[in-house]
Image (cartoon, rainbow, N blue to C red):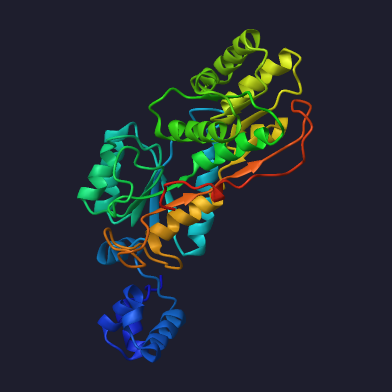
Amino acid sequence: MAQLPTVEDVARVANVSRQTVSNVLNSPEIVKPETRGRVESAIAELGYRPHASAQRLRTRHSSTIGIRLDPLSNGVSGSILDRYLHALTEQAALRGMRMMLFTARDTEDEIEQFRRLRDGADVDAFVLTGTFYGDPRIDWLISQRVPFVTFGRPWGEDMASPDHLWVDVDGFSGVYDATTHLLGRGLTRIGYLGWPAGSGTGDDRRSGWLTAMRERSGLPAADLEALMFVNDESVPTARRAMEELLKADFTLQGLVCASDSLALGAMMAVNEAGRRSFPIIGFDNTPVAQAVGLSSVEQRLDQVAAGTLELLMGATGRRVIPHGESAGGSGEPVHRLVTPKLVVRRSSHLAPVEEAGSTTAGNHNRKENQ
């Protein structure tokens, strides 16, 4: 069997030192272009391939980003993370990066996976999803100075901290757009079906509805309070809740929901009640929403993925930036807040509207660093 070429073989053919070959492989920017060209030609001529594991341990760079793969917890809205991961994988490949999927039983096990992958130089950075207040994963990554970005804001904490990079979707503006769209059709008694208070994402979306209603509905505060309804993230319970609402309040003219799961349950109820012209708007623009013709807010996950990589690698970089550093200097934003898009559809479930359209909450003044 022929012996595989070595670094020494490459150095001999290129007439350079072994260290120069190592520099070309690991830090090509520090080698003169003419010398680098000779080494690269020798590598191609000999068919030399560096040992990937040894190279990772030596350089501490793997061109890989790790992300935990969670099982789908909801058949309707659970596809969001799958779509985000697909967009992230595609865009990472364009930068010469790979995505590594791993599983973990719980938060503590995920931190142990962080440690194992970091110590083996298997990944250069992590992307976290499903963050929550006081998340110990974030504390561990910051203490270990491991680069990371979270898909989701650090609710209740310092959202401008340079130690915590994050990308998120502006739920406020998405629900604000949905609500003003219905208000623009001459409706005033528009309800909101969302999650119990205490969820940063849910509270932000509810705030978008409330702000639009205060500005344009003309309803007193007591009426607005009566139009806010709470439900868990479940199609069957949302359906039952909407059935009760329709029995109790025939003056309700439309509904904006915190998710497509809630909207789908509500749609089933209004369809059963024979109120096919009752407009409902969801959030997430899931495949289910598209299939049944439900208007919904699109999260623009391609932009979320792009923002994730920009925070980790800079606008055009091909290597993860070390923790605590910034590609654009100290004044560079440490987060990306993506403005979603309202997708309006026609179907037998909704009153006739234009096929496509959206308002622009981006012009609505928010005290948010975007």
Q: Residue at x 36, y 38 (%)?
A: 131
Of 75 and 325, nearer the camera is 325
Q: State which quadrant residue 111 falls in.
A: top left
Q: Is residue 144 left or right of residue 69?
A: left
Q: Residue 1 in the image: state x and y as whole percent.
A: 41, 70
- Tell me where residue 225 appears, x and y as whole percent: 50, 20
Left-right relation of 23 to 277: left
Measured from the top left, where is residue 313 in percent x and y?
39, 62
Q: Is residue 26 above or below residue 112?
A: below
In this rendering, the count of numbered labels is: 0
List x then y, in percent, for residue 234: 53, 21
Q: Outermost residue, left direction?
A: 143
Q: Is residue 67 above or below residue 231?
A: below
Q: Nearer the viewer, residue 67 or 196?
A: 196
User: Which quadrant holds residue 47?
Assistant: bottom left
Q: Residue at x 60, y 30 (%)?
A: 217
Q: Is residue 98 visible?
A: no
Q: Is residue 162 visible?
A: yes
